[in-house]
Each structure stands twice: as structure tokens, then as C-alpha cells.
Amino acid sequence: MTAHLPLPIFSPSLDPALERVDIELPQGRAYPIWIGQDLWSNPDTWSSLPKARLALVVSNTVVAPLYAKKLIETLGRQYERVELLALPDGEHFKTWETMNLIFDRLLECGADRKSVLFALGGGVVGDITGFAAACFMRGVPFVQVPTTLLAQVDSSVGGKTAVNHPLGKNMVGAFYQPEQVVCDLGALQTLPARELSAGLAEIIKYGPIADMAFLAWLEDHLELLRQKDPLALAVAVKRSCEIKAWVVSQDEKEGGIRAILNFGHTFGHAIESGLGFGEWLHGEAVGCGMVMACELSCALGLVDQAFVDRMRRLIARAGLPTRAPDLGVQTYLAHMSHDKKAVGGEIQFVVIDAPGRASVRRAAKEVVTQVIEHCVAL
Ligand code: NAD
Ligand code: GLY
């Protein structure tokens, strides 16, 4: 772990056209996250990338028709050959089999170790493409080009890559960092409202774990965010990336503090797997999971009920579910025991120690059972 760094102070005044957040990693590794408007069609955005003959843009059947042409045209100025691969869309296709389509195309095109992959899409495309880049020829460069709010504020940053296994979400993957992340805020204008809400869940997460000033700003600007106001989106994406970069810089491979980014995810993953992948969106499950994790923090005597109610109100205003689905307590417990934070079958949770500060703790099964029963009945 690198030395503890101070979190930059939250400032909502910025340039919505172009902002930069740097993510610093051990051994002098670092990469920029660019946030702004019309970035993909600007050749300057890509000029510092490694030189190569071939670039492969990996997208999906929904995003490629919207944005691939613009990106490929610009990349064509820099790479001799630019190929497009549109994967099938959706969490159901976040599999080893889908990832193989990337290897097939790379080999068909005669890719070499310098070939660069571009992940143009949401978290699903980003996670699969990043993992493919980590594996192909033992590692080729890749660039995150996130097109959902969730991907711009969370999944494209920090180098977690994975595919799902039938027995568990994100169970097969690698830590593998991109060359850079390019968040073009204009892409969010075509995002369906439900997907925007899913992204808001991961944004709200950063408040209770790290920055209550940001949480208060979100309370004041939630309607503007839901209306896709460009300035509000720029502030929310930049602050989220700053907080994520701050955490990942201290703990790249989740030996410690990085686990706080999983706030709400232990309950959330149980909801996703328990209902069947795709029934609730990942962000929806995280939204409800955060309510459950706040209730757990309250049951453990760490925060008061007023804080839990404040979080529940904001999550509901973001268009996210706050009542837990009735899967049965045993189903919750069984799915949570597969969580990557579980040690020797004992479940661990990210809890709020005090508003703006989080940690990982064990909780007695009786307390967790009470919380689940309470959140199902709400
Ligand atoms: P997603 O990638 O499935 O995208 C959501 C939907 O929006 C898809 O149908 C997609 O085709 C469509 N879409 C994408 N961009 C669009 C645009 N600009 N306009 C219109 N439609 C668009 O879902 P997601 O919420 O972006 O990502 C969820 C995934 O991210 C999950 O698999 C989750 O496990 C993963 N994740 C990873 C990390 C990480 O650190 N690596 C963090 C959080 C989540
Ligand atoms: N989304 C959690 C993490 O990146 O660690």
C-alpha cells in the first residue's frame, strides 16, 4: 500500500468541457481519467496512447450503432487498421464464451502484443474487454471508453476486470489497469432513465463512505442529475472519479481500504444472484443494498436512524428500489457466503462507522437476519 493521501477538497466549480483526474499507482504507474464533452471525436484525446498497427474497438449491439463510427473515424488517424467487434448486449453475456469472441477476432486480425483494445460501452463491455486485454498474449494495452453513468463513475476506473461464472458474479477476473479512461458526458444523453438511476446508486455510495459534503451536494442537485444537466453530470462524475482514484491509489488490489467501495454490494450481490442476473440492474441492487447496509450499521450502534432515513430518502429520489425483495433469509445468507469478502465462510460487511467513514466488519447472523427481515417488510 502507498502512503495515505489526503482526499482533494470537493469543489463543484469546474470546466464542463474538459477536466482531468489522475490515478496514481505503485511503481510510478499512473493514468488519466478525462471527463468532458466531445472528447471521442477529438484526435488529441488519443495522441498519447502507445503506437500500434491494430486497434480493436469492442462494443455491443446497442452502443456500437450510436457511437462506434465517430470513435473509429478518429482512431483511424492514428492506427493503420481499426476493427469493430459488437458483442451481444447485457449482463447475461458477461461470460467466458463472450470473451472468447474477442480472442477470436484478435487472432483473425493478426493482432500482436502492441495491439490496443478500446472498451466502448457500459460496465459489462468494460469488464469483459479489460479481462480479455489482461489475458491476450499475457497482456495488451486497453483503453476504457465508458458510455453509462455507472461505468463513468465506477467500473471503468481502478482496473477491476471480470466475467461472471454460473455460480457467482465477477468470479473470474484480474486486476488490470487501462492506459486511460475517457468519459464523454455527451454519451449519457442517450442513456435510458433506468440506467441513469443505476449509475446514481454508485455515485451516492461515495457520500457515506468518504464525503458528506458531496452527499449534501447530491441531495441539492438530484433532480438536475436526473434531467441530465451537463454541468451537474460533470461535477458528479468528476467527484466520483476523484474519490475512487483516492481509494484505489492507496490500495490497488483490495488488501484493505478499497473494500469500502463495496458498500451495499454484499446485500446487493445477493439480490442480483437471488433474483437471477438481469432481473434488477446492478445499480438497483446496490441502491437497495446500501439501505440494508445502513440499517445494519444502525443495528450495530454505529449510526442513528435519522442517518438511515436520510440515505433511504435520497436513494428513493434517485429512482432506485429501497425495499428488499423477499428471497427468504436463507437465500440471502447463502448468496452472501460466496461474497469475495467472506473469510472461511464468515460474511463480512462494509458498514458506516460514522457519516463519511466506512470499514469492513463481521456481524452476528442474528443481527443480519433481523436486518433482512426488517428491510423486506418496509
Ligand atoms: P451495462 O454495461 O449492461 O449497460 C447498461 C445498458 O445500457 C446496456 O443495455 C447497454 O448496452 C446500454 N448502454 C450503454 N451505454 C449507452 C448509451 N450511452 N446510450 C444508450 N444505451 C447505452 O451496465 P452498467 O450498469 O454500465 O455496468 C454494470 C456492470 O458493471 C456489471 O456487470 C457490474 O458487475 C460491473 N461493475 C464493475 C465494476 C468494476 O470496478 N469493474 C464496478 C461496478 C460495476
Ligand atoms: N467497484 C468496486 C471497486 O472497484 O473496487
Image (cartoon, rainbow, N blue to C red):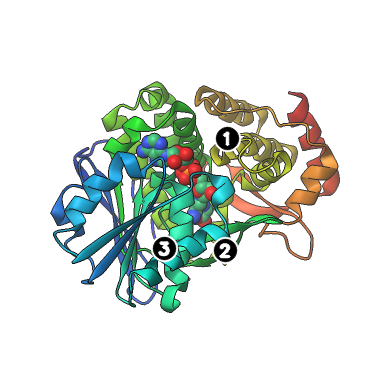
Which quadrant of the structure image shows residue 33? bottom left
Query: Is residue 149 something that shows in the picture?
Result: no
Q: On the rendered structure, is 76 left or right of 296?
A: left
Lower sequence index among marks 2 and 1: 2
Give how far across and how far down residue 180 sits, in percent: 30, 60
Query: Alpha-carbon distance for marks 3 and 1?
Result: 27 Å
Residue type beneath disc 1: Glu
Indicate which label's residue lies in the foreground, 2 or 1.
1
| Dot 1 crowding, Cα within 10 Å, few <14, some 14–19, many 20+ | many
Residue most extreme to the front: 108
In the drawing, what numbered circle is on residue 249?
3
Which quadrant of the structure image shows residue 172? bottom right
Residue type beneath disc 2: Gly
- Residue at 31 percent across and 64 percent down: it is 179
Is residue 220 placed above or below 112 in the rendered structure? above
Q: On the rendered structure, is 177 left or right of 42?
A: right
Lower sequence index among marks 3 and 1: 3
Q: On the rendered structure, is 170 left or right of 158?
A: right
Residue type beneath disc 3: Ser
The reply to whether callout 3 and callout 1 are in contact (CB within 8 Å) is no
Judged from the image, the secondary structure of the residue bearing numbered disc 2 is: loop
Is residue 322 placed above or below 241 in the rendered structure? above
In the drawing, what numbered circle is on residue 256?
2
Is the shortest distance between ligand 2 and the CB of mark 3 under 8 Å?
A: no
* Between 246 and 111, the one nearer to me in the picture: 111
Give how far across and how far down residue 231 sits, in percent: 27, 31
Which quadrant of the structure image shows residue 306? top right
Is the shortest distance between ligand 1 and the CB of mark 1 under 8 Å?
A: no
Disc tally is 3
Query: Alpha-carbon distance for marks 2 and 1?
Result: 26 Å
Residue topped by disc 1: 284
Give how far across and how far down residue 48 sits, in percent: 19, 65
